[in-house]
Structure formats: C-alpha cells, structure tokens
Image (cartoon, rainbow, N blue to C red):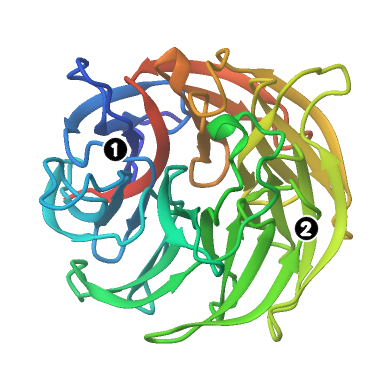
Amino acid sequence: MTTDTQPAEPASRLVAFVGAYGVDGDEQAGGITVLDVARDGRTLTPLGRSAEPREAGHLVYAPGTRTLYAVDERKNDGRGPVQPPAAVHALAVGPDGGLTRVNALPAPGPRPTHLCLDEGRGVLLTANHGDFDHVEHVVRTADGGWDVEYLYDDSTVLLYGLRPDGALAGLRDVHVRTGHGPDPNTSPQAGGHAQSGAHAHSAVVDPSGRFVLVADKGTDRIDVLALGEDTLTPVESHVFPPQTGPRHIAFAPTTGHAYVTCEFASTLAAFAFDAHTGRLTPLDEAPTVDKGHTGLNEPAEVRVHPDGGFVYVNNRGEDSLAWFRTDADGRLTRLGHVPLAPSLHPGVAARSFAFAPGGGFLLVADRPANLVRAYAVDAEDGSLSALGTVDVAQPAYVEFAELPHE
C-alpha cells in the first residue's frame, strides 16, 4: 500500500551561531554569523550576520528565553576609551535565527573568554583571562633607593544575574584571581611570560549546580567555588605541576568525570569529581598529540560526546581534532585525529568545536582556514569523517540552537 503523504516537517529548526574575531580592514571578520544547519550536517547555509559584538570569542544560548549571550573579548583602552569596553552582550534570537540587541554590561578584567549559563537559577558566569601587558611601577625601596615592581592585569570570574526576559540584570559577585606560575616559562606566549599572572580561561558549573570550577592556566590550578545566589565562595583547589596550564573543563554525562585540557603540558587529564565536597581526584592523563608529533603543541577545547564514552580535543600545533576512548574508570586511549588548517601560532588556530544536538555530527571553527567544518561522528568508534564546509571569516566559537517553528 502506498500513500502520497509527505515526510513530517521537523518540529524545530537547527541553527548554529558562529562567533568570530575582528580584523582591521576586513569588514566580514568579527561579530556573529547565523547558519541554517541541515539535520545530517551536510549543508550549512548562512542566514545573516550581526557585526556586534566585534570580538565574539565565546557564546552560550538560553533556550528558555531564546537569548544568546556573547563576550566582547577586549582589553579596555584606558580612561575615556575610544573603543567599546570589554563586555558581555545579550541578544534576542528570532524565529529565523536573527539577532536583536537586548543589552550589554561591562566585564571587569580584560578579555572575557568563557561563558557558562545556569538558566534555571538565572545566572551567567564569565571567566576573564586578563592580558599579558604589564606596567613598570616605580617604587621606593626600604633602604631609600628606587626599584621597579611589575603590575599585571587582574583575571576575574564574574557572576551576572539575569532577568526573566533574558536581559542581563547586573553583577552579583566578582572573584579576583591572584598568583602566577613560573615566569618566564617555556611557552612562546607573550615572549615566555604566559604565566606572569593569573589567567582564568574557563569557569564551568558542575552537573550538580553547586560548584563552579575555574581552570586557571596562569597559576596551574583549578579552583572550586561554591555557587550561591549572589556569591562565589572558594572551597577547594587542585594544584597541578608547574607549567601544566589547565585551560578548559568538560563533564561526562554518564560518569560525572571531569576532563581538562592542559595547555602547556599538552595533555588531557581525567578526574573524579565529588559533587558533595567539590574535590577533584586524578584518574588518568594522556598526551593530546600522536606519538610521532614533534614541536610545540597547545590544546584548547575539550568536549565529551553527549552519549559519553568518547572525549574530543583540538590541538594547536599538531593542528588536529583528536578523539579518545574513556572507560568507567576514566582511563584515556587516543584513537585518532583529523587534520585542521595549519596554525599561525597557538593564538591563531582552530580554537573550538561543538556537537550538534544528539551528537551525530560536530562543527569546528577552523580560524586559519576561515572555515566552519562539519564532521560526522561514528557512534561505534568515535571517528570523524568530513561532511562539508562553509566560509566564515575568523571563526572562533560555535553554539547550536533548536528554534521552534512559529
């Protein structure tokens, strides 16, 4: 028996927001590009672009209010700034993915580089990396002579409140980072001064919603903060060996284990996390690159597949997206990788990637190639196979959203 019925239209439209960095003289660089995404990931169609915020290095979407939050990853340029300040922006998402500015608030501390949303609680967190600049401050010494002390930017973790409509409601708390690692160190970043100050690169709410884990690559620490309604309170710390550089954290949906990219050590670390105390217990650690790789490498993003079992890391130096099998005990086995565009240096490289809902494919922001790349994910072995690409200038971050048809 045959019928003439047509396949049912999907209940929602899948879009991807691609944050990008600005480049002087390139009007297409920076801002946020909206892509219509086919359900199999094979077709990526640009729908439009918002030019602001210009330095949209990280995004997060709130489905309840259909609000997209974006950083403007800047360093303020002094008193009476000519350029906009470092800030967090809220943008309303229309039925077709179009973006409309809601409001923006300053982000104290240079270079807001990471966002984490707890929509149920109505809060948004940012990690502000700080910069590598210093000020030579001339001071008197105890013996009446003169010397120079070096003052570096503050790195911060910010807790914003959200209004019921998704607008930013104001800062509830600011956690100022302190300390530094070996200075100089062996990374070429900032001429060897990559750990001259604290550099919080991510602030992630754990699955229980009780704690915020702050990965600070400048101090070789993950600090665990209790997340209150209006406060961030330090409760635990895990200290890494010198020049490890913990950068990003991702939790496994099945085991609750935490996986951490270690930027300067070029490793992936696995931890058990105690959701009652906030304590991290090391389980395993593995190089993020193939055994044959030589030379500099600094991993960036880490993501756990939505079904668990596989962990993915992008490498800047090897210039790859690699995948690992992980078992119930957290042990890691590197299985393979796909190549990405050659990086100019770790700061201009493929920076991040994201899984589509369900995990059937992922998108990579391959910045040196000015492309967003789509890869199918094999459910059996975690391997990746290329699906297609779309041109986006200076892409930095990908965030998916399901938009109901109206």
Is residue 114 visible in the rendered image? The answer is no
Q: Which numbered dot is residue 55?
A: 1
Q: In the image, what residue occupies the spot 50% across and 65% down?
A: 144
Q: Is residue 262 left or right of residue 139?
A: right
> Up-down: is 145 above or below 280?
above
Could you say where residue 377 lies in the image, as x and y percent from the top left? 64, 32
**Which of the 4 image quadrants contains residue 18?**
top left
103 or 357: nearer the viewer: 103
- Please tell me whether mark 2 sits on a helix, a strand or a loop: loop
Q: Residue 269 in the image: x percent, y percent?
A: 78, 51
CB of mark 2 within 8 Å of CB of mark 1?
no
Reply above or below: 29 against 353: above
Per the image, label 1 sits on a secondary structure element best described as loop
Tell me the distance, in whole angstroms, between the alpha carbons under discs 2 and 1.
31 Å
Residue visible at 59% across and 41% down in the picture: 194
Left or right placement of residue 149 versus residue 111 in this view: right
Which amino acid type is marked by label 2? Phe
At a point 11% along the width and 41% down the height, the residue shown is: 82
Residue assigned mark 2: 240
Label located before the other in sequence (2 or 1): 1
Can residue 137 be seen here?
A: yes
Up/down of 17 relative to 64, above or below: above
Q: Whole-percent x and y of residue 283? A: 87, 59
* Mark number, residue 314: none
Please state which amino acid type lies under the numbered disc 1: Glu
Q: Measuring from the top left, give residue 225's x and y in whole percent.
A: 56, 77
